[in-house]
Image (cartoon, rainbow, N blue to C red):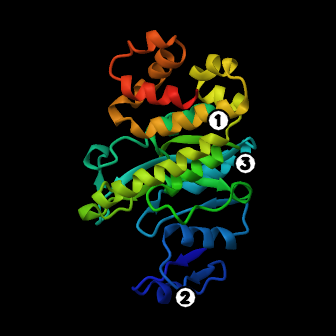
Amino acid sequence: MVTDDHSSDATAQEVRSIADPRVSFAELDRNSGVCAAVNASIERSSGQYVAMLSSDDLFLPAKLAKEARFLDEHDDVGAVFGYPTFIDEAGAPLADDETFYGGVFRVRNRSRDQWLRHLFLHGNMLCSSTALVRRRCYDEVGPFDPALAQVPDLEMWVRLLKRHQIHVIEEPLAAFRIIDDQKNASAPRPEGVVRLHWELRKVLEHYLDLNRAEFAKVFPEFAALMLKMKNTEQFKRAVDALVRFRETLPSSQKEELSKLINNNFMRPIGDRKKSAGFKDQSDYIYSMIQ
């Protein structure tokens, strides 16, 4: 499935020149963004598994075979990922520390609940060009959100993980191209950082849909607090407070979220005041659940 997002180059002409009935080509009538193009391709697909490949990235040899074999052998897994290796515009290899991503994608496997927690605290660390997803999973969770430009993949992985387990094959499976002058969509440009703040809020709102049992697994620090809550509405206010508070934390303090919850939710009000460095925020989040 090849979808051209109304590009101004010769993409459409080049693809139409390929005399292969397996190639399905569609050209959007206006430039609508990555999500619209991906969704159009997924909608036309009919296979059991779906892989995405941006025009500037590459699959490494045996990528699809390894991932398809894994999904064939593990019916309980909805999607499989791998590690990317980085290349520059000319295709020359780049070390992780030569890119703005660093080693963010070098993650280890964990349970579904632990994945949800990790995404909540740290953001995305799953490379979309390495993904192979069961087609039925997209039918269940819906398409990529075209309103998102910075983190549509993160938002999709959260929705996916609320229903399905995932797995990472811990080896390079795709080549991720780093474009000069920070022209990658996820590069830390000022305008991207501004959009990211709004989009991250939309992603975190998915955690509001977790029921009590699911939430206790993702955030076990809340287990004792949840037993004290009188009704579901109070629980929902607590979750919303956690989501809002997550947005206020600088990256250097996200690891301290568990400590904050323990120090401020599990202790009497007087003891909460002793939680150094978090007084203003803890007063805010605690007031949200009263």
Residue type at the position of mark 3: Asp
Which circle's residue, 1 or 2, is located before the other in the chain?
Answer: 2
Residue that label 1 marks = 236
Position of 102 with respect to 76 (left or right) is left
Q: Residue at x 66, y 82 (%)?
A: 21
Q: Is residue 235 above or below residue 53?
A: above
Q: Determine the secondary structure under disc 2.
A: helix
Residue that label 2 marks = 16
Quarter containing the N terminus: bottom right
Q: Residues within 10 Å of mark 3 (few under 14, many from 20)?
A: few
Q: Residue at x 49, y 68 (%)?
A: 34
Q: Which mark is residue 189?
A: none
The answer to whether residue 53 is seen in the rendering is yes
CA–CA distance in space, label 3 to label 2: 33 Å
x and y percentages locating residue 80 in the rendered image: 60, 47
Q: Which mark is residue 72?
A: 3
